[in-house]
Image (cartoon, rainbow, N blue to C red):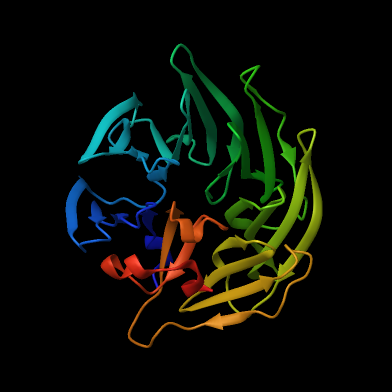
Amino acid sequence: MFFNNAEILIKKSNRDLNIFKLSDKIIYEDIKANTNEIYKKELMDGDYSFVDINIDIDENDNVYGILNDKKGKLLSISIEDDVYMDTILKYDCKNFFIKFPYIKKFSKEDHIFYYLVKKENPNISDLIHIYKDKNFSMKNIVDYIPYNIMSNFEVIWDKNIPILFYFKHVDEVEELFVSVFNIKKNKWSEPFKITDSKKSKIYLSVIKDIRGYYNIVFSEENDGKYYCKYIKGELVYNKFEVLESTLIKTELMCLFPHLINHRNELYIQWGEYNNLYTCKSVDLGATWGKTKLNNPEADKFLKRYIYKSNNIEERDYIVNSIFTDKEDIDMLDYKITDSL
């Protein structure tokens, strides 16, 4: 099980698949659902992972994204009859590096986020936001972020308003913060600290459930082990009110936890070495059942996908990543329930 080598999987409304394979190069695959035809193209040569690229799909099945080429450019990606890449911005790659580029496109505006790190001071990053419309462009520093181990940030949307969740090193450990963008003032709110556990944290995942509550999971150190921590809450005047908080313990380290919401059911999944664990709540996080071990077939390995779907059969699911032992063309028949 190679969770660090996550791939990106996009499923269109007609069940066509776009897969971005990330390792010593970036390979794009387009798989047609009605013919099983596969088109492959190498997009970039070199060592790339999910910290270098972000892909999304809009409600009209337009697939787009952003890529850090590591040579001084952030590139836009658009999928039409082929894959097209254009320069969004240039940066000084001799003195800086960029991690976790993210893009969201709306009809009249774009939002871009990324960590910018100065190489001579690699334990502090700027969390950057660029807001663009047809007549206007503004760059903001959301926060200055000291860190021990860099983790991803999460962007949750309230219509076209971005809400940022991220870890920040405070008194030698990571704590969780949130900040909200004021689109009228083009300004970010004062970051609000959600946690104060004084324990190390890594691997952040956030979704907004069907009732509008924010559901958060991450790995948190307790007594020398990293367990899965769950938090449910709501934003009230840019301050986060914690409604539920649960620590889910198993024997091994919790890797890459994520959430899946289906109606009133909420699932937490995470990896621990060669095993996949699932914990289910039938009341949207108020209580949790026993942890279940999901074993793949003996001759297969589980893979982690960053997952976006427009398939009507999955419209009742809120999810941002999945684990499955299926690959390539076999993913045409994949259903989220296969992973639960």
Image point 43% across, 56% down: which residue?
A: 311
Does 190 appear above or below 241? above
| Quarter of the rendering occupied by the C terminus | bottom right
Q: Nearer the viewer, residue 235 or 35?
A: 35
Q: Nearer the viewer, residue 17 or 279?
A: 17
Image point 44% across, 52% down: which residue?
A: 308
Spot occupied by residue 1 in the image (x, y as percentages of width and height): 40, 74
Q: Nearer the viewer, residue 17 or 176?
A: 17
Please, which residue is most extreme toward the top here? 135
On the question of residue 25 being in view, the answer is: no
On the question of residue 240 being in view, the answer is: yes
Spot occupied by residue 164 in the image (x, y as percentages of width and height): 61, 39
Image point 25% across, 39% down: which residue?
A: 80
Spot occupied by residue 125 in the image (x, y as percentages of width and height): 53, 36
Q: How many marks?
A: 0
Q: Nearer the viewer, residue 183 or 198?
A: 183
Q: Is residue 68 left or right of residue 82?
A: right
